[in-house]
Amino acid sequence: MSRVYNFSAGPSMLPEEVLKKAQAEMLECGDSGMSVMEMSHRSKDYDKIIKGAEALVRELMNVPDNYKVMFVQGGGSTQFAMVPLNLGIKCKAADYIITGQWAKKAAQEAEKYIKVNRVASSADKTFSYIPKTTAADFSSKDEVDYCYICFNNTIYGTRYTKLPETEATLVADISSNVMSEVIDVSKFGLLFAGAQKNLGPAGVVLVIAREDLIGEPMEGTPTMLTYKTHADNDSLYNTPPTYAIYILKLVLEWIKEQGGIAAVQKVNEEKAKLLYDFLDSSKLFKGTVEKEDRSLMNVPFVTGDADLDAKFVKEATAAGLVNLKGHRTVGGMRASIYNAMPVEGVKTLVEFMKKFEQENM
Ligand SMILES: *Cc1c(COP(=O)(O)O)cnc(C)c1O
């Protein structure tokens, strides 16, 4: 069996070069005489890996000096609690825009600790668009500690192309679009991303936070859920997910070799255009998202007939195009085309869709 084109929403494809490098270094990494998995997280060899990963995040994302870069555990979902516990301390309130499941879950979790204002939502149309807002929709910065968005909505396939006009500190979940497009870090107070979509294996979360936001958290906050713990200890307060961070570093080196995030973004735009252009011209398939809010990473589409959708997914799988089944709340199909998906994979998918259309119309 050869490698397939994996359109999974996450965990998702990794660049083949990265997997090969990891394979070559599996038994002995550098001249350490051991696998990265066997290294002490306090060793000189491992220090090079974690410091190297942080330096690459700073370089690739152009992170300003007054921001901390942290690697923490617990997946993206743990950030749903860490954000309010650490940032929701003055006003004990925050604005949330509900653009899908992940934003909804984040708001529900925050509500355990602070007051949550759901300032806008696209639930009325199954989250198929980004709600339009104006400055007047948001609380003032004296009323809330932050305003929270999910930048790219993995399940529904929408993304922000223009940031909300809030005067409060902006916090964003960038789990599914991190390093897929250029993001101006200075516009945000805090950004976080679970690694398993664009950065590496599950088990590590990248957090980028402005220093002035990293202080004493809410009383009773566990040590491990306190940003200060990780910031003050260079992400080595306890044993970090060492192997996941190592793979993440290899992925960042790969992004750098591609020419950096702007270059990767160009390829991502090309891939998304191939697929969206076909969807717009197809008589059988159609995209489910408002055109102006379309994600570059997650592309949901349907035929309008659930049986035909199932047939498509089955035949695509047999042709080596796997994990195209849509999320259970949307139905149909979803192609996740993260950084590691080659242009060739998207071309192959579009050709397959054309053939399926001819055979089933
Ligand atoms: C996958 C995902 C999450 C959840 O990540 P876990 O690591 O599974 O907790 C959160 N937000 C977004 C946008 C995601 O795509």
Image (cartoon, rainbow, N blue to C red):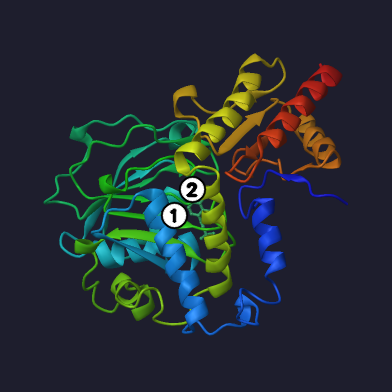
| Amino acid found under the numbered disc labelled 2 | Gln
Compare residues 354 and 182 and report the one nearer the observer: 182
- Mark 1 Cβ inside 8 Å of ligand 1: yes
Decide: marks 2, 1 in contact (CB < 8 A)?
Answer: yes
Left or right: 240 as drawn, with respect to 82: right
> CA gap, disc 2 to disc 1?
6 Å
Report which residue position mark 2 lands on.
101
Q: Mark 2 packing: few (<14 Cα in 10 Å), some, or many (20+)? A: some
Q: Please report the residue visible at 67 percent of the width from the left and 70 percent of the height from the top.
A: 25
Residue at 48 percent of width and 52 percent of height = 175
Badge 1 density bin: few <14, some 14–19, many ≥20, Cα 10 Å = some
Q: Nearer the viewer, residue 170 or 211?
A: 211
Give the residue at mark 1: 105
The numbered mark at residue 185 is none
Residue 153 lies, in percent from the top left, at 48, 42
- Which residue reaches farthest left? 142
Identify the element where label 1 is drawn: helix
Residue 341 seen by the camera:
yes
Q: Quadrant of the C terminus?
A: top right
> Cβ(mark 2) to ligand 1 < 8 Å?
no
Q: Which image quadrant for residue 336?
A: top right
Q: Amino acid at mark 1?
A: Lys
Identify whether 24 is placed above or below 135. below
User: Is the residue 284 above or below the residue 247 in the image?
Assistant: above
x, y percentage for residue 169?
22, 50
| Front-most of residues 261 and 161 | 261
Secondary structure under the numbered disc 2 in the rendered image = helix
User: How many marks overall?
Assistant: 2
Q: What's the residue at 21%, 70% (across, down)? A: 215
Q: Is residue 203 visible?
A: no
